[in-house]
Amino acid sequence: MQVFPEKAVLFISVPVSALRGIDTDQDGMLQPNEIKAGRPEIIRQLEQGIALTVGGDRGRVLDDQLIVSTHVDNRASTTQVEWLRHLAIEQPFFNGEMRLQISPQMLASDYFVEARRGDYAEVVKLSASHPAHTFFKDAWGTLKSFWIDGVEHILSGADHLVFLLVMLLTSVSLRRWLWVLTAFTVAHGLTYTLATMEWIYIQPALVESVIAMTIIISSSVSLLGLRPALRSELAATFGFGLFHGLGFASAMAGMSINSRFPLISVLGFNLGIETGQLTVACALALFTWLLARFNRDTFFLSRIAAVIGLLAGLYWLAQRI
């Protein structure tokens, strides 16, 4: 995608499988006659599945072209169609944010999309789980966007969430929780920042395996009833957090490359992770307080969390090595 003065250009490739009713002979490919006969319907489906706005304006269509650059079977057949659309953009909207949204059914695989405006370019990875992105955000928009990504990542990341639950439920103490969460946050914030700035790099496969091992170790310590001194526990938590930060960076790699505000994006994501962690901690604190009010022992929670953590950690480790 590129924005010129008063015009935006969208160029995107769409697999034939994403188009309904166009492949008349059902061979998984389109021939020139099928593209020619189905052109109006192809464009209609593309318009429904792919939305581009600049400054909130959808623009006025200047031209639509369907291009075939990939042929198969040494014929004119193709398994994908490229859509080139020119949109007239009014001057008041030209410097606004650009938003691209693709329906999940058209995202047969991950898409790396580049948007350009003048000398600035921004690249993002779109997928079925992340089908939309807003380009050229201002500083505040960047902070909010990465904050949301951080919150979603910690709350939807099963391995990080299991580790957090095991770590907190090993011993329910506000003082301990504050110190442990602080150590974990500082550690993963440090390595996430360094990895995002490309100052350090470790193979993602190794990082993911080590994260599984941190869950196994933490769960085993809890199940064995070991209670290390707080200083030792903080040191271990800090070390584990270093690898979780690298895991965060690996998961976010390619989601938003060449951000206009790299430091703000790192800050926003770290704040989002911290918000998610505090949300989990507050929910656990409320739950354990309610149990205490009804004279229920919270010890069984740590055992359940540890058993789940151990089984999940072993599964993830076997899956990742």
Image: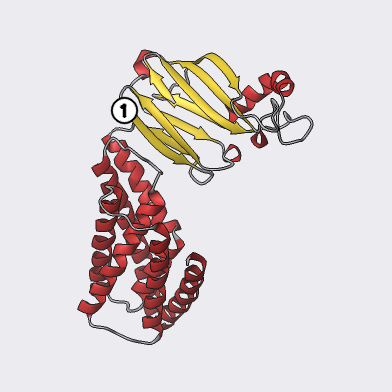
Q: Residue at x 37, y 63 (%)?
A: 280
Q: Is residue 25 above or below residue 165?
A: above
- Report the amino acid beneath label 1: Tyr
Q: Is residue 266 above or below residue 179?
A: above
Q: Who is closer to the viewer here, 63 or 44?
A: 63
Question: Of all residues shown, which one is farthest toward the left?
Answer: 231
Q: Residue at x 37, y 19 (%)?
A: 93
Image position, residue 276 (x, y; %): 35, 57
Q: Residue at x 37, y 26 (%)?
A: 116
Image position, residue 270 (x, y; %): 29, 52
Q: Who is closer to the viewer here, 160 or 10?
A: 10
Look at the numbered disc 1 and give the secondary structure of its residue. strand
Image quadrant of residue 73? Answer: top right
The quadrant the N terminus occupies is top left
Q: Who is closer to the viewer here, 110 or 159?
A: 110
Judged left or right of residue 87, residue 123 is: left
Image quadrant of residue 98? Answer: top left
Query: Can the viewer see residue 181 in this picture?
Result: yes
Image position, residue 289 (x, y; %): 35, 74
Disc 1 residue crowd, few under 14, some 14–19, many 20+, Cα 10 Å: few
- The residue carrying mark 1 is 120
Image position, residue 178 (x, y; %): 24, 68
Question: Of all residues shown, which one is farthest toward the right?
Answer: 25
